[in-house]
């Protein structure tokens, strides 16, 4: 039974993975723990530090004080350095906004003056973005410095000049490629210009930007599960800009612009919800950049400047009929804070496989203590199986409809499981000709069965049972098999057919003798009934049947050899034992050593003989040059013999031959000189 | 008896004449003879060893014996060439013969070392 349960759990887990693709959960503790692991502050750049700090702040996780101290030091260094580029200033100011390092108004004044000087000369979107962003940050951090822009209209126009007809932006006027990411940066910058302007910006200009936003939203792409995103066509060399960064940038730009102009953009609520679903659908990103984009965008959406998306999350998408599970829905904002007063309605239920939906208008009961909406009773039409529930969020207060985006109807896949009723289970042996029952046994699947039957090839075996859902409907499981296993491990599997609730399989042995390979003897019977939604799936041994089959004819096929255990096929193979050559018999060491010494005897005899013969070195040349050659000749021979010894010990033939070539030439030369000298002296002696 | 003592006398006489004849042999030829005896004796000892314990590192045994026999043969060749009574090598200086001997020995031992295992 344990294996059955494991199988069920496996199926459930697979289906829940599949389901999670379209059930969105708000930001939770898993994000917080992931964030504290991902942001290690190992990248010392201010940009990475800002992204980490900003994300941690949104998630409510504090950075440790060591990081704060060291970061503040680098911020102050960067901001007081007159040569810092605008990008570093921008991120330095942003980090300072979060950490509130000690910076004097003098610092701010210097930076403001520098930036204000550079703004008129800026010609790329990024220059504008960093300059305006820095000024906004200075404005937020001190009130002593005047950051207002006199020529705000002009700056607004030069940024607007980079926009394209489809709502995207170019990075600079001499770069024709445009992107949604740049559009987000531009919108954020324009929002900044509006809030820095010393005089009101022309209403007409703001309206053209609103039009651009509308056009940008026309190009938004959609996934099947209702998530919307901005695709990034321009591929960046840094590889960081994809749909996530583009969507995040647009959302940030959008909210900044909306907040600065404090006008309603009248964006469709379903697209805002869709964007929120896109960011939430990513789950927990694996790298710092993606996590920043996700959390930053969600924080922007939550900031009540466009529309705040509300996300219904289902606590468990698998519901058991038998244990009377309740369907619980929690509605929160994207970051998980509580939603306003609202009710959740179950509008429709689709059954998987059939297109027709039952229309229901059932309001879920709200538990104000836990903030959970509960569906107390499943609709009557919902039996076990896979369903799609359609929920709708209805805000109670009409004013809230301008603040919150409910995202229309939310489709949620739901699994309903239950314990199936199995009864009238019988196993019988029938006579073939009349069909009359010879022996019949009742079966009960709650306990062990061990029926013992016997049959011959003229009889039939019938197994039958009834299966119905908790609501009494017919149920057709994915798997219903009857397995007969012979003593020799030969297995035969039969499908159990059904008509309505009745499941029957009849084995006519007369037609099966050949398939059974004429193997008489004991067959174990096993019945398997299983389905993902069936909580009491089982695989049970029913007992055995003693079959008496006729003798096989001569040409009958033999049963294939069965492996003892099919699982062994995938198990480890037998260890290979290597046969090594047995070592040769060697003599005792002493004997070998004795002979080694014995070998020296003739040599000693040779030396003694030489002495006895009175050998001398008188003819060894005495004058310097021939003596040198003679010595070299002997050294050369010695060297060649030494080389042979080396060859025997470690060198290979090629190295040896190479060395031998050189030594040979040398030896020939000195040998020739020596021997010819000796020859000439002996010739002189003769002639004398 | 008489016959056998005559035989031993003959043998003694033969031995004496051989010895006296050999005493006239030049010293350098004696050295070569000594060298040949040394080489053959070494080879014999190795053969005895193999006869006693078996021929397991057979290539080593072959190398050892062939090295001795080979160098003995080369020494005999040297002796033939150096011997002044061999008229056919009259024009060949003994130094040239010695150089040949050295060269042949070096080549022989290169092969032997390769074969030693």
Image: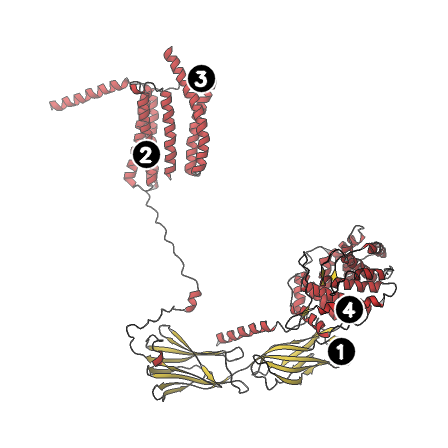
Between A645 and A248, the residue placed more toward the observer is A248
- Looking at the image, residue A354 sits to the left or right of residue A392; the answer is left
Mark 4 = which residue?
A: A211
Tag 2 residue: B66
Secondary-structure class at tag 3: loop
The first of marks 3 and 1 along the sequence is: 1
Q: Position of residue B117 (x, y in %)?
A: 38, 40
- Please identify, in this view, whether the residue under mark 3 or under mark 1 is nearer the observer: 1
Q: Give the distance between the C-alpha atoms of the residues marked 1 and 2, in whole angstroms.
A: 110 Å
Q: Residue furthest front?
A: A165
Q: Residue at x 50, y 82 (%)?
A: A476
Q: Are marks 3 and 1 in contact (CB under 8 Å)?
A: no
Q: CA distance from mark 4 to mark 1?
A: 23 Å
Left/right of residue A674 with respect to residue B89 in the rendered view: right
Q: Does A249 sit left or right of A683 as displayed?
A: right
Q: Residues within 10 Å of mark 2 (few under 14, many from 20)?
A: some
- Is the same chain shared between marks 1 and 2? no
- Mark 3, mark 2: which one is toward the viewer? 2
Give me the C-alpha separation between circle 3 and circle 2: 37 Å
Horizontal and vertical percent for residue A382? 59, 84
User: Label 1: how many residues lie within 10 Å, few (<14), some (14-19) or many (20+)?
Assistant: some
Q: Name the residue that disc number 1 marks.
A: A401
Find disc 3 in the rendering and name its residue: A622
Q: Chain of mark 1?
A: A
């Amino acid at each position: 039974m344990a294996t059955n349960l494991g199988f069920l759990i496996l199926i459930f887990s697979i289906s829940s993975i599949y389901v999670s693709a379209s059930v969105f959960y708000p930001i939770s503790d898993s994000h917080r723990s992931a964030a504290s692991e991902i942001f290690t502050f190992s990248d010392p750049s201010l940009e990475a530090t800002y992204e980490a700090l900003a994300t941690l702040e949104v998630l409510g996780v504090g950075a440790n004080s060591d990081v704060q101290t060291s970061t503040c030091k680098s911020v102050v260094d960067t901001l007081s350095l007159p040569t810092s580029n605008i990008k570093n200033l921008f991120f330095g100011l942003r980090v300072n906004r979060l950490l509130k390092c000690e910076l004097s108004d003098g610092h701010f004044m210097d930076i403001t003056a520098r930036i204000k000087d550079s703004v008129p000369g800026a010609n790329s979107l990024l220059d504008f973005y960093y300059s305006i962003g820095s000024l906004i940050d200075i404005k937020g951090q001190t009130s002593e410095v005047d950051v207002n822009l006199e020529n705000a209209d002009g700056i607004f126009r030069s940024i607007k000049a980079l926009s394209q007809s489809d709502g995207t932006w170019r990075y600079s006027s001499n770069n024709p490629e445009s992107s949604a990411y740049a559009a987000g940066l531009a919108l954020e910058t324009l929002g900044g210009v509006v809030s820095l302007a010393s005089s009101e910006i022309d209403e007409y200009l703001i309206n053209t930007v609103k039009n651009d936003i509308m056009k940008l939203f026309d190009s938004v792409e959609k996934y099947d599960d209702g998530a919307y995103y901005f695709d990034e066509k321009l591929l960046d060399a840094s590889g960081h800009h994809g749909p996530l960064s583009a969507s995040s940038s647009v959302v940030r730009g959008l909210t900044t612009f909306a907040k600065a102009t404090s006008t309603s953009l009248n964006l469709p609520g379903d697209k805002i919800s869709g964007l929120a679903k896109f960011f939430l659908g990513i789950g927990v990103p694996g790298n710092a950049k993606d996590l920043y984009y996700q959390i930053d965008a969600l924080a922007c959406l939550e900031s009540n400047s466009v529309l705040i998306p509300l996300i219904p999350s289902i606590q468990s998408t698998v519901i058991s009929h038998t244990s009377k599970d309740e369907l619980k829905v929690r509605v929160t904002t994207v970051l998980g804070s509580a939603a306003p007063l609202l009710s959740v309605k179950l509008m429709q239920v689709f059954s998987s496989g059939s297109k027709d939906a039952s229309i229901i208008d059932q309001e879920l009961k709200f538990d104000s203590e836990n903030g959970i909406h509960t569906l107390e009773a499943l609709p009557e039409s919902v039996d076990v199986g896979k369903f799609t529930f359609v929920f709708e969020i209805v805000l109670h207060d009409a004013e809230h409809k301008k603040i919150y985006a409910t995202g229309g109807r939310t489709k949620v896949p739901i699994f309903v499981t239950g314990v199936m009723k199995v009864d009238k289970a019988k196993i019988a042996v029938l006579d073939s000709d009349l069909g009359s029952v010879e022996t019949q046994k009742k079966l009960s699947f709650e306990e062990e069965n061990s029926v013992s039957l016997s049959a011959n090839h003229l009889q039939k075996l019938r197994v039958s049972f009834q299966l119905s859902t908790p609501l009494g409907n017919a149920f057709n499981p994915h798997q219903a098999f009857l397995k007969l296993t012979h003593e020799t491990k030969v297995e035969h599997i039969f499908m159990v057919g059904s008509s309505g609730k009745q499941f029957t399989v009849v084995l006519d042995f007369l037609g099966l003798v050949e398939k059974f390979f004429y193997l008489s003897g004991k067959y174990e019977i096993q019945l398997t009934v299983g389905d993902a939604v069936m909580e009491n799936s089982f695989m049970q041994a029913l007992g055995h049947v003693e079959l008496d089959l006729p003798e096989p004819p001569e040409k009958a096929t033999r049963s294939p050899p069965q492996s003892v255990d099919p699982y062994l096929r995938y198990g480890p193979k037998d260890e290979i034992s290597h046969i090594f050559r047995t070592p040769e018999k060697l003599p005792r060491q002493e004997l070998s050593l004795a002979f080694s010494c014995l070998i020296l005897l003739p040599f000693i005899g040779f030396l003694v003989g030489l002495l006895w013969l009175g050998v001398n070195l008188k003819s060894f040349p005495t004058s310097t040059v021939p003596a040198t050659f003679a010595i070299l000749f002997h050294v050369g021979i010695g060297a060649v013999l030494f080389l042979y010894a080396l060859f025997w010990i470690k060198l290979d033939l090629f190295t040896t031959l190479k060395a031998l070539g050189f030594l040979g030439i040398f030896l020939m030369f000195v040998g020739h000189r020596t021997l010819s000298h000796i020859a000439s002296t002996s010739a002189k002696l003769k002639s004398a | 008896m008489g016959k056998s003592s005559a035989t031993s006398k003959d043998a003694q006489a033969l031995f004496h004449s051989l010895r006296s004849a050999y005493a006239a042999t030049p010293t350098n030829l004696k050295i070569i003879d000594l060298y040949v005896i040394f080489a053959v004796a070494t080879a014999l000892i190795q053969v005895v060893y193999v006869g006693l314990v078996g021929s397991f590192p057979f290539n080593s045994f072959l190398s050892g014996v062939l090295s001795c026999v080979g160098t003995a043969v080369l020494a005999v060749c040297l002796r033939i060439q150096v011997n002044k009574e061999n008229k056919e090598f009259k024009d060949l200086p003994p130094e040239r013969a010695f150089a040949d001997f050295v060269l042949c020995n070096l080549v022989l031992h290169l092969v032997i070392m390769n074969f030693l295992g």
